[in-house]
Amino acid sequence: MAASSPKSEATRKSIRQAFLRIEKGRPKVVDKGRKISIASVAEEAGLSRAAIHKSYPDIAEKIREVSGKAVRSQRDLKNQELKCEKEKNRVLRLQLTELGEKVKVLASKNATLTLKNNELQILVDSKNIAVLMPNKG
């Protein structure tokens, strides 16, 4: 195989360097936010995707492995974040339910006190009773 010639070793090195530049977020050719893929590495190295697939299948496999791990780790991270947010949501819903029950109790007590206050006001008005307020001074 031609993979042992000096030219192919230089190309292999170029591919590895392109891969590392993209992985570290410091590519020279492709956009910095671009994900690692055979296409992005090939473009960064100035080669075709077919050249990497055909002449450097070991590197192509490594790129697929790394890009797959990145996708999986991003997915796993998002799933973990989603679980945390769902748990926060569950706790907040529980708190909301508890607070709703407390509001109902307070509304009931308020209604009862309002009725009592109205009854006392009627009694005071009907008896023409003067409510004595303590002198403050």
Image (cartoon, helix red, strand yellow):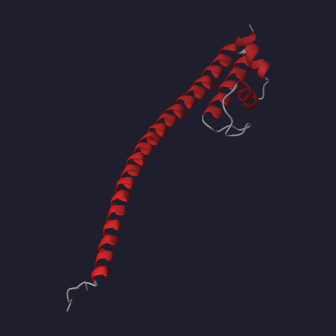
Number of numbered markers: 0
Image location (x, y in percent) of residue 2 = 75, 10
Image location (x, y in percent) of residue 7 = 75, 19
**Which quarter of the rendered picture does the N terminus lie within?**
top right
Foreground residue, 25 or 80?
Answer: 80
Specify the farthest residue to the bottom.
137
Specify the farthest residue to the top.
1
Foreground residue, 36 or 108?
Answer: 108
Residue for point 71% across, 38% down = 28
Q: In the drawing, does residue 82 fall left or right of residue 100?
A: right
Is 121 situated above or below 71? below
Foreground residue, 59 or 17?
Answer: 59
Residue for point 65% across, 33% down = 22
Q: In the drawing, does residue 14 fall left or right of residue 83?
A: right
Is 19 situated above or below 136? above
**Which quarter of the rendered picture does the C terminus lie within?**
bottom left
Please identify the quarter of the rendering in which residue 55 is found.
Answer: top right
Is 134 situated above or below 21? below
Residue for point 58% across, 24% down = 69
Q: In the drawing, does residue 20 fall left or right of residue 118?
A: right
Image location (x, y in percent) of residue 26 = 64, 39
Residue for point 43% across, 48% down = 96
